[in-house]
Amino acid sequence: MTEKGNKYLMICCFFIFTVNGLFAMVLGSLLPLISAEYGLSNMLSGTLLSMHQAGALAAGFLAGMLPYYMGRKKALLFLLTFVIIGFSIVIITGNPIFLLIGFLFTGISRGSISNYCNAIVNETSGGKTAALNFLHSLFAVGALLAPFLVIFSTNVAGDEGWKISVLVIIGFVAVSILMFARAKMGTIETTEKKQKLSYGFLKKRRIWYGIGIIFFYLCVEATVNGWIVTYFIDEGIMSRQYAQTLASVLWVVMLAGRLSIVFIGDRIAKRWIMLTAAVFTAAFYVMLLATRSIPMITIAIAGLGFSMAGIYPTLLASLSKTIKDYPQSLGVLLLLGGIGAIAMPTITGALSDWFGIFAGMSAVIVAIVLMLLFILLEIKSEKSEKLEISSHDCPM
């Protein structure tokens, strides 16, 4: 492919990845408006978020399989249409079955965009870290803009304005489809590497502790992103607009937290970064639920986002040797861990229906405590592993 063609393809990826951040994070701001429009229970609202997460997880299989049958370009264009179909369903009907399908479809597109764009930018840039960092920064930009799109739309058209937000996203995705349709895209490499598959990592305790950490971390992240705006509104703590603004604050500090990890990650032991981050996550989340003071809640949101930011990437870095030795381990880690993001929003919704939304949000504390427990177990296992290695290396 020519340099001009590569540059155009990168621009396409950068644009759709920004849109991906926009529609991935807009769901939390739209949820209270959609629920009010269609008279949905909290459990059903939570299940909608879970279906979106399930779609994102399923996209890992679809995005990997379809290019071998359709070609990469046709597969990407096909999977992009799912978000248009999904959001169109959400606008047209409040039927619970169709809403669940609609949210599932948005998740499929979200996950597919992530898979394809990461691969394309990595290949096109020659594996340059700067290009991938820029790509993920654009996701954060889209995520930051999401609540403001909803605020603008509702200012224009009141409670019906959420449909304008959805139509804007559909328009952006349609533009990206036209852009990718003009792009020249390389084919999937079909030469198979003679690599023996091994699942020996399943015998390693650290991998299972890592799965536990990711599972409960994603429980927390999915629930906070999906439910926090609804919690603030339903509890009458603050206005809808300020609640949506705080959703952006959460992403600003998470981005700042991830950038901070880049600078301190090699200077401080990873186990202490994870442990400290988990302790502060617990402290700030309890603070968030314990007060109705808007300034204190704002501080709690900022602290929560900054603390959470370091857990996921630090864990993957901590397990990098196992992941390198057993490439299949990463897929298992993300697949089993991703179930947490699917399960917890529905659990939160069910508890909110039965006992009130405060009880639903309080359940996240249990997930944080269990995440902290698995981090302690992982640290203990890491120390034991190092002792075993050093004892083997000692001369007799």
Image (cartoon, helix red, strand yellow):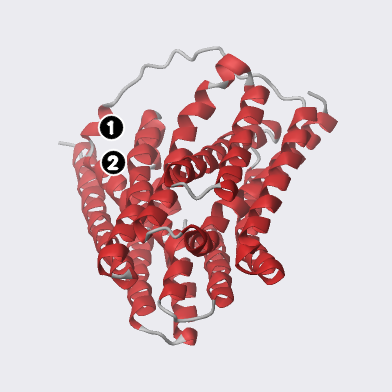
* Res. 118 in view: yes
Camera-side residue of 191 and 170: 170
Q: Which residue is mark 1?
A: 201
* Res. 263 in view: no
- The residue positioned 32% from the left and 49% from the top of the image is 343
The location of residue 203, given as percent across then percent down, is 21, 33
The location of residue 309, given as percent across then percent down, is 46, 61
Q: Residues within 10 Å of mark 1 (few under 14, many from 20)?
A: some
Dot placed on the residue nearer the N-terminal end, 1 or 2: 1
Q: Amino acid at mark 1?
A: Phe
Camera-side residue of 264 and 139: 139
Which structural element holds mark 2? helix
State yes or no: discs 1 and 2 in contact (Cβ < 8 Å): yes
The answer to whether residue 63 is left or right of residue 207 is right
- The residue positioned 68% from the left and 43% from the top of the image is 16
Q: Which residue is mark 2?
A: 207
Q: Amino acid at mark 2?
A: Ile
- The residue positioned 25% from the left and 32% from the top of the image is 202
